[in-house]
Amino acid sequence: MRSTIFLLIFICLITFSSCKNKEKIFINGNVQFAVQQTDLMLKQTGNPQGKYPRTINKEGILVFTSMYDWTPGFFPGTLWYLYELTGEDHWKAEAVKWTESLEPLKTFTGHHDLGFMMYCSYGNAYRLDPNEKYKEILVESANSLSTRFNPVTRTIKSWNYRKAWNDTIEWFYPVIIDNMMNLEMLFFASKVTGDKKYYDIAVSHANTTIKNHLRSDYSSYHVVDYDTISGTVKCQATCQGYSDNSTWARGQAWGIYGFTMMFRETGDSVYLNVAKKMTDWYLKTPNLPADKVPYWDFNAGQAGYEPEGTSKAKMITEKYRDASAAAVVASALFELGEFTKNEVYLKTAVDMVHTLSSPAYRAILGQSGNFILMHSVGSIPHGAEIDVPLVYADYYFIEALVRYKRMLDK
């Protein structure tokens, strides 16, 4: 009897070891592909020169943005992850060059995305190559982001005045769920300076987001516009989703990731519960395809979810997938799965990175502008970046591989 038990234990250990090795080979294969594709990207881009890769146009040509767009931090961040995954100095040198080109942004206050811009770049830089210069830049960036906090609304203002995509509604103090992703830089600043003001701003914003961005079923609104005199909600709406009452896929992904991060930084179980419930909604909604890569909006074209105006309705009911949303969720689930010891979350994360690395979503070497993933969506209501690669899809996919590798190495 005892020999039988030992035999079963031995077989289990051998099987586990075999699976672990197989998955490490899977990760290494994806890293090798990312290295090759990104080397080709670097040959296209040359030195930063104030322009940063974002997507491709209809002709398949690489599209750049300035540093003042919300996305310039993702390419340097991807370079830092490739350095972490390979240990090769070549990637560190490129990461340093592209990161340090963003230093002027440390005083930028034009919109809320400074966390994406500076923490994905300088945050990874400081984590992998800590020095005072990077720390000081991050703290100054946190100060700049903090200027957009309003104690009346208890939120960080996302955008300045703008109209909804249909041009019929004005937003004077719009806050978007994406803003949850910018709070991590505030926690960093609080830790390295000992100043609690950054921590308090992040917590205040997150708590207000729970109150006003989340529905009772833990699906999410994209935009909430506030009255700055009373602090009350003027409207709950969408900008990049299908309709005001629908759930924009990447918005739900930002929430899952953002509240998982909030639990990591505060230890407050309220945030863990929100992250779990937003995840469960994502995974259990009947509109999620079997491969867990969502359509760009979970409710596009469904009865009861009507976009404002009808001129774009036909276009935006198309069933485009958004690999960027899936990459964000996959990365978050590696962390959330470990926090909760939930095997379903961890298995889903593994399944999702396998799906994203399949021929259905991973680019062919030398194609798709030399991005890593295909089939993402920017903003269908604006007719922008539809079914194309996006730099932030690549960033979160590589981050998911980093987190998976760490898990296997434990």
Image: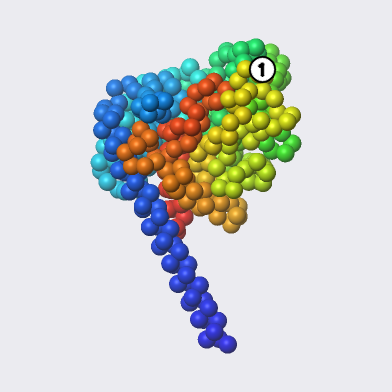
In which image quadrant can residue 131 be found? top left
Dot 1: element: loop
Position of residue 255 measured from the top left corner of the image (x, y, whole percent): 59, 36
Residue for point 67% across, 36% down? 219
Q: Position of residue 278 (x, y in %)?
A: 65, 41
Q: Is residue 270 left or right of residue 291?
A: right
Viewer-proximal residue, 109 or 48? Answer: 48
Coloring basis for residues: rainbow
Judge whether 291 appears above or below 385 on screen: below
Q: Is residue 76 left or right of residue 179?
A: left
Question: How many dots with numbers?
Answer: 1
Which residue type carries mark 1?
Answer: Gly
Q: Residue at x 62, y 43 (%)?
A: 288
Locate residue 157, reporting x and y percent: 57, 20
Pinpoint residue 393: horizontal percent, then vertical percent. Answer: 46, 37
Q: Nearer the viewer, residue 271 or 87?
A: 87
- Residue at 38% over, 35% down: 368
Q: Which residue is mark 1?
A: 309
Residue 247 visible somewhere in the drawing: no
**344 is higher (above) or lower (below) than 211:** below
Q: Residue furthest front?
A: 314
Whether residue 93 is visible to the viewer of this picture, yes or no, is yes
Please identify the quarter of the rendering in which residue 176 is found. Answer: top right
**Residue at the image position 40 percent from the left and 55 percent from the top:** 26
Quadrant location, the N terminus: bottom right
User: Which image quarter is the C terminus in?
Assistant: bottom left
Residue 129, relative to residue 26: is it above or below?
above
Of 336 and 318, which appears nearest the observer? 318
Callout 1: 10 Å neighbours few (<14), some, many (20+)? few
